[in-house]
């Protein structure tokens, strides 16, 4: 290959090297490879002695021209890259500052706080209990018979040592009554777990707020009045409540509490399955068997209890039609609260 062809070849090699988006450190290597003391251009200059005398001048000019092209190419690209680095690392002090987004409370935490605030005004203290519970607190002391379906593996997460992830906040009632004597007027907020199929209205973990009032002569009327007051405060004065007869082993009589559907305002729609009502929780008068398991005198004391699903209440309040949104933590959802 003639030395003249070699110059052309080096030029196109260099252009390819520049076009391959080298990093800043690679660019320095390219400069050394071509322009360094032991670089290819110095080699070419040394070979000028092998060119026939009449073309020595022409060859020298060609190599000098290539040297300049290489110098310019490396300089231009490296200055572009340095500028880019400065901008991305915020070195340009004339640019406006970066604004950080501030976090906010999760809608479930907000709902719990709003609910607690209302119950606080109604005279309720706050108590808490563990999320890993003994079967005695979660079931036996609450009058669940041994063969009750809620104890089934299908509904309850069992741990290897025989404890359970609490399936409701009602075991905190037991802990509270074992620790204190009546009168008791307390709410018990917390996370609960159920081994159930997940859908728009059900999740395997959710939050409840339990309520318990025990004293002499506590009546079902007081229970209804308390829940009505709470719902009016929380949902607004026009909300309607419905108490449906139901069954819980730990209350007698027992009711399920429904409020008017947030979407159709009671007319009937897809969300409320055309009933106009949505269930928010269960309630009832404490069963005397529960008083017996905590050594309370069931002849002397009566009491009411309720347990509400916090996610369901938040869904009603904010018109959310899928419980899973609370657990996905998509910022586009969370920042609306
Ligand atoms: C109970 O858990 C009773 N411990 C409530 C109670 C307390 C009754 C005190 C009487 C006295 P229930 O299984 O119905 O009841 O659950 C109560 C509320 O939790 C439901 O009304 C609903 O709002 C919510 N809930 C139940 N299962 C789920 C679930 N898988 N996902 C989200 N919320 C749920």
Image (tube, rainbow, N blue to C red):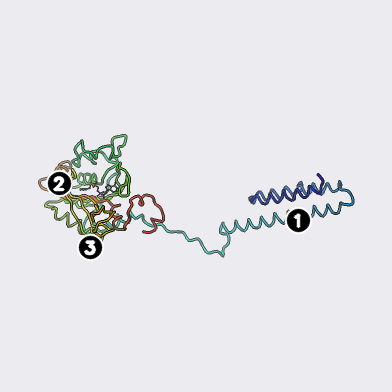
Q: Under tag 1, what secondary structure?
A: helix
**What is the quadrant of the N terminus in the image?**
top right
Residue drawn where x is 40% and y is 53% of the image: 330
Whole-angstrom CA distance, mark 1 to mark 3, is 84 Å
Q: Under tag 2, what secondary structure?
A: strand
Residue 226's image quarter? bottom left
Residue 168's image quarter? top left
Q: Position of residue 67 (x, y in %)?
A: 76, 53
Q: Under tag 3, what secondary structure?
A: loop
Whole-angstrom CA distance, mark 3 to mark 2, is 29 Å
Answer few, some or many: residues within 10 Å of disc 3's Cα (few below 14, many 20 plus, some between 14 and 19). few
Q: Position of residue 273 (x, y in %)?
A: 26, 52
Left or right: where does residue 186 sit relative to residue 322? left
**What is the quadrant of the C terminus in the image?**
bottom left
Give the residue at mark 1: 68
Answer few, some or many: residues within 10 Å of disc 1's Cα (few below 14, many 20 plus, some between 14 and 19). few
Answer whether labels 1 and 3 touch (C-beta < 8 Å): no
Callout 3: CB less than 8 Å from ligand 1: no
Left or right: where does residue 77 sit relative to residue 205? right
Give the residue at mark 2: 252
């Amino acid at each position: 290959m003639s030395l003249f062809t070699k110059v052309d070849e080096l030029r196109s090699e260099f252009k390819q090297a520049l076009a391959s988006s080298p990093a800043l450190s690679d660019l320095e290597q390219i400069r050394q490879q071509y322009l360094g003391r032991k670089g290819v251009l110095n080699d070419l200059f040394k070979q000028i002695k092998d060119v026939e005398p009449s073309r020595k001048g022409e060859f020298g000019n060609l190599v000098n021209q290539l040297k300049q092209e290489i110098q310019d190419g490396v300089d231009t690209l490296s200055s572009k890259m340095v500028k880019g680095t400065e901008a991305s690392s915020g070195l340009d002090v004339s640019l406006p500052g970066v604004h950080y987004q501030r976090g906010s409370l999760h809608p479930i935490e907000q709902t719990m706080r709003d609910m607690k605030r209302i119950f606080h005004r109604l005279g309720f203290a706050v108590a808490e209990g563990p999320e890993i519970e003994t079967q005695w607190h979660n079931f036996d002391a609450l009058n669940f018979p041994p063969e009750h379906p809620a104890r089934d593996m299908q509904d309850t997460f069992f741990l290897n040592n025989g404890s359970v992830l609490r399936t409701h906040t009602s075991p905190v009632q037991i802990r509270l009554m074992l620790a204190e004597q009546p009168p008791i007027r307390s709410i018990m907020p917390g996370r609960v777990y159920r081994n159930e199929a997940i859908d728009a209205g059900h999740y395997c973990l959710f939050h409840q707020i339990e309520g318990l009032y025990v004293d002499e002569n506590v009546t079902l009327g007081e229970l209804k009045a308390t829940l009505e007051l709470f719902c009016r405060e929380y949902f607004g004065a026009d909300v309607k409540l419905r108490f449906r007869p139901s069954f819980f082993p730990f209350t007698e009589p027992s009711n399920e509490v429904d409020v008017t559907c947030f979407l159709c305002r009671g007319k009937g729609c897809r969300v409320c399955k055309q009933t106009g009502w949505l269930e928010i929780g269960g309630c009832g008068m404490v069963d005397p068997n529960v008083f017996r398991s905590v050594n309370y005198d069931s002849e002397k004391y009566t009491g009411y209890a309720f347990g509400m699903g916090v996610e369901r209440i938040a869904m009603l309040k904010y018109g959310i039609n899928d419980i899973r949104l609370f657990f996905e933590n998509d910022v586009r959802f969370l920042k609306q609260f």
